[in-house]
Structure formats: C-alpha cells, structure tokens
C-alpha cells in the first residue's frame, strides 16, 4: 500500500525532497559565506581606521601595537567599547604579509611616508577582498533565490499535475461506473449498515419500481410499500444476519424472504400490477469486515409464471391419469349411462342459459338457477358414485358459482350469469376428455369381459378396430346396458367410504335387494340417484361424529341400511340411518332465518308440513355448503325424480335416534 | 473434523453420516432429538453439527439455544425442509451458520459442509 502511493506520487515526492534538501544546503552555505564576508568587512574597517589614525596621529607606540596585532592576530581596541578579535594577516590577506613586515620596519625607522605607502597598499588589499567577498555573497544569494524559485515552481507543477492526473482517473472511472449503471438490466444498489439505500444505483432499478427518481432512504421502509409486513420483518432479520459475521452467506441464500417475492407496483395511471422480483444480497468486505451489502434485483415474473404453468400442466396430467385409473374400474354400461345423462343435462342447462335474454325478471332468473343447481347436483351425485372425482369437483364448482351469483347480486340480470358459461365449458370439456379416454382405452376393458361374445359371434379374426367401433357405440345407446352388470351396492359402498372419510365419520352401509335383477330396468337410474342423495345426506347431516355418538351412548360406527323389495303395492325403497334424526325446532328456526316462514306461521305448522320444509328448494340445515351436502338441493332432486315416476314418498324420524326415507313405486309404473 | 448428526429420522442420520464419512469427516455421534444431542454434545465436543428443526422432545431451535450456552464455537448446519423461513432465520440469529434444504442430494450436502468449514481448514 505504501509502495503503491509512493509510485503514484513519485514526481511530487522527488521534487519536494530536492526542494527541502536544497533549501537546507542554501541556508548552510549562506551562513558560512555571510560570516566570511562580515569578517572581511570588519578586517577592512579595522585597517581603514588604523590607516586614518596613522594619518592623524603619526607613527605612535599605540599604532605600532595595533599594526602588530593586525599582523599576528589578537584583540584590537579601536575605541573604548569596540573590541575586535583578528586573525593573523597571513591568514586573512596572505598577499599583504610582506607589506605588513615592511610597514613595521618603516615604523621602526620612523619613515612616515614609506609607512603610509605600505599602509595604503594593505588597505587597498583589504578593501579589494571585502568587495570580492560581498560580490560573491550577493551573486550566491541571487543564484540561490533563482534556484529556490525554480524548485518551488517544480514542486507546484508536480502537485498540480498529480492532482489533475487523479482527477482524470476519477472522472474516467466515474464515467465507466455510470456507463455500467445505466446499461445493466439488473437493479443494483448498495446498503450501509443502517440499511440506507446508496445513491449509486443502476437505472433499471427505478424502472422496476416505476419510480421517477432514484431510490433513497431506509431500505425496509422503502420495501414495505411493496411487499407484505411479514416479509419486511423477515427481511430485517435476514439483513441483520448478513451484516453480522457468523452465518455463511451462501448457506443462508435460501432463507432470503425477498427471493422471488410478489411485489405490487402502482402504475403511472394508478392501476396495480403484480410482478415477481428476485432480490439478492452480497456482502461487501473492507479489510475483512462487512461494510455494505450489494443488493441486486431481477424481474423474474416470466420465469415464475412459466414455472407455475408447468406445474399446472403437470397437475392436469396427473388428474387425467387419475381419471383414467378411475374409469378403468367403472362398468362400461354405467359409464355410458353417465355420459348420456350428463350430456343431456349439460346441453339442457346450456340451452336454458342461452335462451334467457331480455324480459327475464330477477325472479325468473333465480328460479332458473335453482333448476340448474338441482340438475347439476344430480351430475355431482352420479359422478361421485362412479368415483369420477374430477367431474364431481367441476359440478361442485358450478354450484358454487351459482350460489355466489345468488348472494352477490341483489337483482340478477342476464349478464351476471356469464361466469357460469366458463364452468359449463369446463364440464363439457371434462366430459369430452372422459369420452375420448374411454374410447382410447375401451379395448383394455372389454377384451377380457366380452371375450366369449367375440369368440362365439364373430370368430377369432375380428380386428381390434372392429371391437373399438362396436364398443364406441355403447355410450350412445343408454337402453343397451345389461342389467346383470349393474352393481348399485358396490358403488354405494364406495360412496360411503369416500364421503365419510371426507367428513371424518365412521359409517357402515348394509343393503339388501340392490344387486342383480331385482331392480326393474327403468328404475335403476332413479334408485341409484335417490340412494346416492339420501346416503350423502345421512352421512353429512344425519350421522354424528364418532365422538358425539360415543357421548350419546351410541355405537361409534353409524349404520345406514338400504332395502329394496317388491310388494303387492309395488316396489319399495327404504333408506334408514341411526343418526341424529331431525331437530324440528332447529329446522323451523332455520326456515325463519331464511325468510321461508314467518315466526307466526312456523308456530302453526303441523308435523306434516314441517317435513315439507325439507324438500323446499335451497333449504339446508348445514351452515356451510361443503363438497358433500349443504345446498339444500339433494332432497329437491329426489322430489323431482319421485314425481317423474309418480311414486310416493314418506319420511319418518326421531330426534337423536333415526331418520328414514321411503319411496313406493306404484305397480303400474314398474 | 468431528461431526455430530442430529435428526429424528434414522434414514436422514444414516444418509448424512454416509455422505460425510466419504468426504473424510469423522462422525463422532448421532442423536434423534435435542435432549440426546445436548447430552452427547457435552461429552463429544464436535466441531460441526448438522441439526434438524422439527424433532420430538426438544426441537432444533431450543437445542441451538442450549448448545450456544455450552460452546458457541460449534458450527451448526440446519438441515430442514424450507417450510417456515421465520423459524429458520431465528435459528440463524441464535447462532447457526447455515441452512440446507431437505430433501438434499449427496452433492449439495457435501458442498454445504465444505462451505461451512472452509475457513477452518
């Protein structure tokens, strides 16, 4: 580091050193020469004074003493208080030594004129020396002044050069930084340990936050306008960890709460935009300590959405596979029946939705929706019993949409029904998918079960294509199913298993008369639907949770019994559960709450009428509409089917003990 | 380097031990919950500890708290599912050095441990 700065400021350093060195040298030389010159001046003065004394007073004893002192050196007294120490003349004025001897000899012999002549010569020599010294000193001082000035100038030049060079480098590097910051697509910024956002940041950062000016202030305050409070709190903890020196930066990257975080940006026109930003923070170390964090931000919205789409596709594939697995277990005839029923119901619903236009009142539309609900509910029941869960969920979603429309709008108009078409389209496409799957895989299922048919009727040369062709016709002819293939019992067992698991109940189902040829063909579909809806109701509304059953002193397992038999009056279907029965008081209260009854009317109701409430469309004792029950549609469907068959139904119950539903299909009908 | 493995799953304990042994780490102990971990830690004094967060008896967070009181020099790598960032950040602020997400690959575990001790060797 020291070496580096030396190289950088080398010129300045050398010239300054030279300047200082020269200046000290000059002072030393000047001092020496000045002293020498002063000495010369003083010598000359002493000689002049002695000379004039000689002229004034003649050759006295005192004069002889003085001249002797000048010759050999020593202290001379010029006046009472002026004493001067002189060096011998041989040292001071070597050329004057002989002259001084002659002067002394002249004084000895008292030759005044010779003495004066000699004294004058010495005097001239002294003056000449004095002048030489003075001149030399002056010249030296002038040269020194010039040199000093020059060196000083050099130092200044070096200094200016150095500074301007530094400036150029700095300007250059700033330009480069600005270039990088304005072109880089990543959002870059620095955070200090107080979490302040630094002023140096990339231009794209502003763009990401749709901000007009540079980001500034406390980072957490800034970010809190865009992400959830929880994320802000986690971000603070995370940044604290990075500013500390304990955790390993790489090993906590996963914990960054601002990694692929959803950010809500307000656009310039005031609307919101939801994007995904990926923040990364890197430690900036100065001498081994974390001085700053370098933050980088990338807009990863596309990647996140793509990933999500991929996941959805994967899920859809899994769902299709599930559906495939489920249809492999379903009896082909039932599947055909389901296709036909569902297809016709969906078309009916679609037509009625399309038909309703202007002139439909709120009441008309509500009635229409109720009818649609009831039909869709039937599809849901059928799908459930066949284990076609995807279809069951789709029907459930449609029911959800219908109730949402009913509650959200005070007055429903035609265009409020628009969302239903989406649901309906999904159900159509599910149905198409299902049909396609069945067609594709029909070979697998039928070859084993219908092998004998092929062998006896067509011989062994029948191609697979022919089989498919023949089988593909099955769904289109609902009357062609074989009665002995229908097994309502096992479908219901399956339904009880699924629905009771979903509702956390323990239930066993006992049936009699439901298998084989005991059910007349035209009644199969009706009986299956009625049984499905009833069983579902029993599980959800009737039979209590295992805990409540044990508390009430009942066996943990609830029991549902279904009995079908032929009597002299006709066919009887009885469905009974040993659940909680019906709480009439609660039922009436519910009816009042739903404004189906006024409190006065409720008080007057006879028991028979209370039962009628159960069949009131849109009425349910369940508070929340769940997957399995709670819309008050199930009994509505039953009533419609019973009416269609001109059958009679009967309900009996006892609070806390049982609930029984019976239908009598008159002989003529069967 | 002495390593201790703490996880309630025996499969994970075996897996971590196997990978780290092959990376020339010495597995000195393993524990299936925080209580066991602290008992063993006092005796074994490992340099490195891999630690699960969700464990019966005593969870990872409490374990870190207790271990830091005994010897704050140990390098703890939290090995857990990335379910709750708040808890994991808490683990770091209590003194853990890093985090590895479950499920991990042999490679990612080896790399994480290397990173954890890179300034020690």
Image: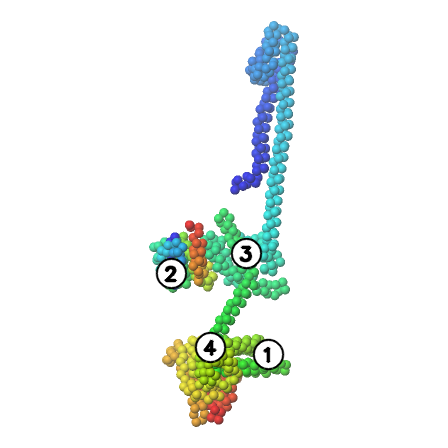
Q: Which residue is mark 4?
A: A444
Q: Which residue is mark 1?
A: A412
Q: Closer to us: mark 3 or mark 4?
A: 4
Residue A513 placed where, x, y %? 42, 87
Instruction: Tell me the quarter of the picture where residue B15 sits.
Output: bottom left
Q: Which residue is mark 2?
A: B14
Residue A296, numbered label: 3
Question: Disc 3 vs disc 4: Cβ atoms closer than 8 Å?
Answer: no
Q: Which chain is home to disc 2?
A: B
Per the image, label 3 sits on a secondary structure element best described as strand
Local crowd at mark 1 within 10 Å, few (<14), some, or many (≥20)? some
Q: Is residue A385 left or right of residue A426?
A: left
Same chain for the residues at labels 3 and 2, yes or no?
A: no
Q: Alpha-carbon distance for marks 4 and 1?
A: 49 Å
Residue A627 placed where, x, y %? 48, 77
Q: Which chain is home to disc 4?
A: A
Residue positioned 43% across, 92% down in the render:
A567
Residue A469, numbered label: none
Residue lying furthest front:
A461
Q: Alpha-carbon distance for marks 3 and 2?
A: 39 Å
Q: Alpha-carbon distance for marks 2 and 4?
A: 44 Å
Residue A421 placed where, x, y %? 58, 77
Q: Which chain is home to disc 1?
A: A
Q: Earlier in the sequence, mark 4 or mark 1?
A: 1
Same chain for the residues at labels 3 and 4, yes or no?
A: yes
Q: Alpha-carbon distance for marks 3 and 1?
A: 51 Å
Per the image, label 1 sits on a secondary structure element best described as loop
């Amino acid at each position: 580091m020291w070496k580096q700065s030396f190289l950088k400021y080398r010129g300045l350093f050398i010239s300054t050193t030279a300047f200082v060195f020269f200046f000290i040298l000059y002072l030393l030389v000047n001092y020496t020469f000045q002293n020498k010159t002063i000495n010369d001046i003083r010598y000359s003065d002493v000689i002049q004074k002695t000379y004039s004394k000689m002229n004034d007073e003649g050759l006295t004893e005192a004069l002889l003493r003085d001249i002797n002192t000048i010759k050999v050196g020593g202290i001379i007294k010029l006046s009472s208080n002026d004493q001067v120490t002189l060096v011998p003349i041989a040292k001071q004025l070597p050329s004057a030594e002989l002259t001084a001897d002659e002067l002394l000899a002249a004084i000895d012999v008292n030759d005044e004129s010779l003495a004066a002549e000699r004294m004058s010569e010495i005097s001239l020599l002294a003056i000449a020396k004095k002048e030489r010294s003075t001149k030399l000193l002056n010249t030296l001082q002038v040269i020194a002044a010039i040199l000093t000035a020059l060196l000083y100038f050099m130092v200044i030049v070096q200094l200016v050069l150095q500074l301007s060079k530094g400036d150029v480098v700095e300007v250059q590097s700033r330009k480069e930084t600005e270039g990088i910051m304005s072109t880089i697509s990543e959002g870059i910024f620095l955070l200090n340990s107080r979490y302040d956002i630094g002023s140096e940041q990339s231009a794209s950062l502003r763009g990401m936050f749709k901000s007009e000016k540079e980001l500034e202030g406390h980072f957490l305050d800034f970010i809190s306008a865009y992400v959830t409070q929880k994320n802000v709190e986690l971000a603070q903890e995370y940044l604290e960890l990075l500013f500390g020196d304990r955790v390993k930066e790489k090993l906590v990257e996963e914990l960054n709460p601002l990694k692929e975080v959803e950010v809500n940006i307000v656009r310039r026109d005031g609307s919101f935009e939801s994007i995904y930003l990926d923040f990364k923070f890197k430690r900036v170390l100065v001498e081994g300590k974390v001085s700053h964090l370098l933050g980088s931000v990338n807009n990863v919205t596309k990647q996140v959405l793509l990933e999500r789409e991929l996941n959805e596709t994967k899920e859809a594939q899994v769902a299709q596979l599930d559906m495939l697995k489920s249809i492999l277990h379903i009896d082909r005839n039932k599947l055909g029946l389901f296709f036909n029923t569902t297809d016709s119901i969906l078309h009916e619903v679609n037509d009625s939705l399309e038909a309703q236009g202007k002139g439909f009142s709120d009441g008309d539309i509500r009635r229409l929706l109720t009818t649609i609900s009831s039909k869709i509910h039937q599809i849901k029941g059928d799908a459930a019993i066949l284990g076609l869960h995807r279809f069951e969920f789709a029907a459930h979603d449609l029911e959800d949409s219908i109730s949402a429309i009913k509650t959200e709008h005070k007055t429903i108009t035609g265009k409020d029904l628009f969302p239903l078409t989406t649901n309906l389209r999904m159900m159509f496409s599910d149905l198409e998918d299902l049909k396609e799957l069945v067609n594709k895989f029909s070979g697998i299922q039928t070859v084993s079960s219908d092998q004998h048919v092929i062998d006896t009727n067509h011989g062994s040369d029948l191609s697979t294509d022919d089989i498919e062709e023949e089988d593909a016709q099955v769904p289109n002819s609902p009357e062609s199913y074989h009665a002995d293939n229908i097994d309502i019992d096992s479908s219901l067992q399956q339904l009880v298993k699924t629905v009771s698991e979903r509702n956390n109940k323990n239930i066993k189902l006992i049936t009699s008369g439901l298998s084989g040829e005991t059910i007349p063909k035209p009644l199969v579909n009706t009986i299956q639907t009625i049984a499905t809806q009833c069983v579902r109701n029993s599980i959800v509304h009737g039979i209590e949770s295992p805990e409540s059953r044990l508390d009430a002193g009942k066996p943990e397992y609830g029991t549902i019994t279904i009995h079908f038999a032929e009597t002299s009056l006709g066919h009887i279907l009885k469905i009974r559960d040993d659940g909680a029965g019906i709480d009439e008081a609660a039922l009436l209260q519910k009816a009042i709450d739903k404004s189906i009854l006024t409190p006065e009317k409720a008080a007057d109701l006879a028991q028979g009428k209370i039962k009628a409430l159960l069949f009131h469309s849109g009425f349910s004792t369940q508070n929340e509409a769940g997957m399995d029950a709670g819309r008050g549609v199930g009994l509505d469907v039953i009533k419609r089917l019973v009416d269609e068959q001109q059958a009679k139904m009967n309900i009996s119950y006892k609070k806390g003990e049982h609930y029984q539903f019976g239908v009598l299909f008159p002989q003529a009908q069967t | 380097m002495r390593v201790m493995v703490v996880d309630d799953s025996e499969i994970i304990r075996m897996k971590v031990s196997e990978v780290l042994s092959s990376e020339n780490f010495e597995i000195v102990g393993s524990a299936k919950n925080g209580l066991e971990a602290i008992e063993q830690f006092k005796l074994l004094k490992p340099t490195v500890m891999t630690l699960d967060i969700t464990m019966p008896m005593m969870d990872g967070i409490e374990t870190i708290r207790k271990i830091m009181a005994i010897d704050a020099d140990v390098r703890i790598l939290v090995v857990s599912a990335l379910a709750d960032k708040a808890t994991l950040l808490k683990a770091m602020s209590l003194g853990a050095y890093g985090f590895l997400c479950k499920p991990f690959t042999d490679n990612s575990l080896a790399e994480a441990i290397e990173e954890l001790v890179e300034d020690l060797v």
